């Protein structure tokens, strides 16, 4: 894509505005770690909610949705739509608890909930594992996607595209280290708004093209191929036109995945930048409202323009190879947008990229500074200096990791499998006093061991083949669950003083008889009813929008 001066002007104005909005929060507002990593714990709930969804909208996200639609039709999106139940579970049952905990990071919660040297070790391990290792992988795959986009849109070589992304990443790192979370969240609102305007604008121009023929053209050209089905067929065969979902995969997606697996942005019980945004709001009620807003925007508003462009790309670019279907989305930008609109879409992609990178760097630096380096023992000025240095170091490490990655899909699969079965511990540690530090350690380690066995040993490879598609995931979840339950009951409970302190601060309405709590089943029943009702409602709105568009 050749950008003219109008397009470049739009992009430059957007980047300048992002810099201005973020850096204006530098001097007075950032005095300590709470200001830097949690925005002073007084973000408006709607800003926190939009910031959550902006962070999940990375440069790779619309490409991934377009690829899913091209390969498996609309129904292929159930691979991530299934997470809605878990997202709303987090909102209804855990948002207030995270806010009440008063911790700075999710790793710090470990030493509030568990006790002793083992808890201190797990806290530091999680700080490195999540804040550095997993975080660098996430940033790496986001960078890979942005490199692909820049190569297509600007016609650069892979090396030129990498250095362009490296420059962008350092730009984001500098403004995010200056502004802290408050500036990041405010800029997220701008970036998400622009990204969605750009997405709808792209869908408008692509659908209006004679080659597509609008929504009616999509229905007439793709309707008889099963591509527009909202639900997958269930079976054990495959088809080039329909997504025929094996029963094992269905069980894995719908019955296990939404609660059993740790995955960035979809952590069972909350975690990562979602927990960070919950804790950054003014009150626990604001934390709840922010998380519900995130789920609604994430599932009902965001995906449909991407899905429509993905469907149009099937018609427009039938020759694209299966492993490059994601590029159909980028080609539509190159081929169908007029001057000005291309600049707006370029700014939208930049916004999506920048919002994700700024959050990942800030959140990861918080884990490393607070939970690995333990900077709270130092004076506030030194705390901030170390935190900013860690942010820059994390960005450099992530850039190096980017050079080592070759496949976004491979990273996704590894991250997903590495967290299979951990989710139930992350949920129950809030509601069941008997969960201890060894429960979480065993649930963290077991999936890695099982993953390595299934992928790299002859016996494991043969066993996985015999299990059938999807059942390997169910197998890992069930074995991991069995392992951590055994570890829970053969190891001592946390001491009563630690459990009492945690309960008094967080006030969870669960199995806490050890501190004299009696479960309020009426309140618990209301929460379950709210969760189920909201899940049905949001799914209904999601599918209704699709039905109206493609009826």
Image (cartoon, rainbow, N blue to C red):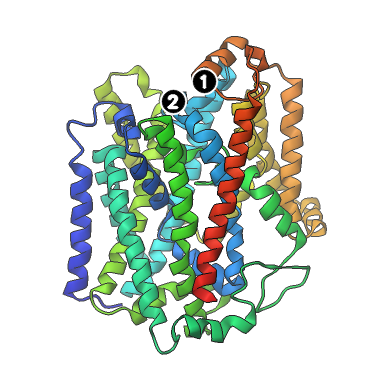
- Residue farthest along the top direction in this orientation: 497
Residue for point 18% across, 73% down: 6
Q: Is residue 238 above or below residue 283?
A: below
Label 2 Cα neighbours within 10 Å, binned few <14 / some 14-19 / many ≥20: some
Left or right: residue 62 compared with residue 414: left
* Image quarter (top left, top right, bottom left or bottom right) of the N terminus: bottom left
What is the number of the mark on residue 198? none
Residue 167 locus on image (x, y percent):
28, 56
Q: Secondary structure at mark 1?
A: helix
Left or right: residue 123 compared with residue 337: right
Q: Secondary structure at mark 2?
A: loop
Kindly check if marks 1 and 2 are in contact, taking CB atoms under 8 A apart as contact. Answer: yes
Q: Which residue is mark 1?
A: 112
Residue 274 locus on image (x, y percent):
46, 41
Label 1 Cα neighbours within 10 Å, binned few <14 / some 14-19 / many ≥20: some
Q: Which residue is mark 2?
A: 103
Residue 315 locus on image (x, y percent):
50, 84
Q: Tag 2 or tag 1, which sits nearer the N-term? A: 2
Residue for point 18% across, 55% down: 16
Q: Which quadrant of the structure image shows residue 35? A: top left
Q: Nearer the viewer, residue 97 or 366?
A: 97
Alpha carbon separation for disc pair 1 and 2 = 8 Å
Q: Is residue 166 above or below residue 491?
A: below
Observer able to see residue 13: yes
Residue for point 31% across, 55% down: 191
Q: Is residue 274 above or below residue 510?
A: below
Q: Nearer the viewer, residue 154 or 508?
A: 508
Observer able to see residue 399: no
């Amino acid at each position: 894509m050749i950008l003219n001066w109008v397009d470049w002007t739009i992009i430059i104005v957007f980047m300048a505005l992002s810099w201005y909005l973020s850096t204006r929060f530098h001097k007075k507002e950032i005095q300590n770690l709470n200001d830097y990593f949690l925005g002073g714990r007084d973000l408006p709930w709607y800003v926190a909610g939009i910031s959550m969804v902006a962070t999940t909208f990375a440069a790779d996200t619309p490409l991934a949705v377009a690829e899913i639609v091209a390969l498996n039709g609309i129904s292929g999106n159930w691979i991530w739509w299934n997470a809605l139940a878990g997202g709303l579970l987090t909102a209804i049952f855990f948002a207030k608890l995270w806010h009440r905990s008063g911790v700075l990071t999710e790793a710090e919660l470990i030493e509030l909930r568990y006790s002793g040297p083992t808890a201190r070790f797990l806290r530091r391990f999680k700080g490195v594992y999540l804040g550095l290792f997993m975080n660098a992988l996430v940033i790496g795959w986001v960078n890979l996607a942005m490199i692909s986009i820049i190569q297509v849109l600007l016609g650069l070589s892979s090396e030129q595209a990498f250095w362009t992304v490296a420059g962008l990443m350092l730009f984001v790192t500098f403004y995010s280290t200056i502004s802290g979370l408050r500036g990041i969240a405010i800029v997220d609102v701008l970036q998400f708004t622009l990204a969605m305007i750009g997405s709808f604008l792209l869908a408008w121009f692509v659908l209006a093209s004679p080659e597509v023929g609008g929504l009616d053209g999509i229905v007439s050209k793709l309707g008889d191929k099963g591509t527009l089905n909202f639900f997958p067929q269930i079976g054990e065969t495959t088809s080039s036109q329909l997504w025929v979902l094996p029963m094992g995969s269905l069980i894995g997606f719908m019955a296990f995945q939404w609660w059993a697996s740790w995955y960035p942005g979809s952590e069972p019980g909350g975690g990562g930048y979602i927990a960070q945004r919950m804790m950054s709001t003014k009150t626990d009620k604001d934390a709840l409202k922010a998380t519900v807003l995130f789920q609604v925007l994430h599932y009902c508003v965001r995906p449909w323009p991407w899905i429509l462009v993905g469907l149009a790309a099937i018609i427009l670019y039938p020759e694209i190879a299966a492993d490059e279907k994601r590029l159909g989305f980028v080609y539509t930008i190159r081929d169908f947008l007029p001057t000005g609109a291309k600049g707006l879409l370029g700014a939208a992609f930049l916004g999506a990229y920048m919002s994700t990178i700024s959050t990942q760097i800030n959140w990861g630096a918080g884990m490393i500074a607070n939970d690995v380096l333990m900077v709270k023992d130092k004076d506030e000025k030194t705390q901030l200096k170390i935190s900013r240095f860690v942010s820059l170091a994390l960005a450099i490490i992530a850039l190096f990791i980017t050079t080592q990655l070759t496949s976004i899909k491979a990273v996704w699969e590894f991250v997903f499998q590495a967290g299979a079965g951990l989710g139930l511990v992350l949920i129950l540690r809030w509601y069941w006093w008997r969960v201890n530090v060894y429960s979480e350690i065993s649930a963290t380690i077991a999936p890695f061991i099982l993953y390595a066995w299934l992928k790299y040993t002859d016996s494991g490879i043969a066993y996985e083949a015999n299990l059938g598609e999807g059942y390997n995931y169910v197998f890992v979840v069930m074995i991991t669950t069995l392992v951590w339950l055994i570890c829970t009951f053969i190891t001592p409970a946390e001491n009563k003083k630690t459990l009492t302190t945690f309960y008094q601060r967080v006030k969870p309405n669960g199995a806490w008889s050890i501190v004299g709590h009696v479960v309020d089943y009426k309140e618990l029943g209301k929460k379950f009813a709210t969760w189920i009702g909201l899940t049905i409602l949001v799914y209904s709105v999601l599918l209704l929008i699709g039905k109206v568009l493609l009826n």
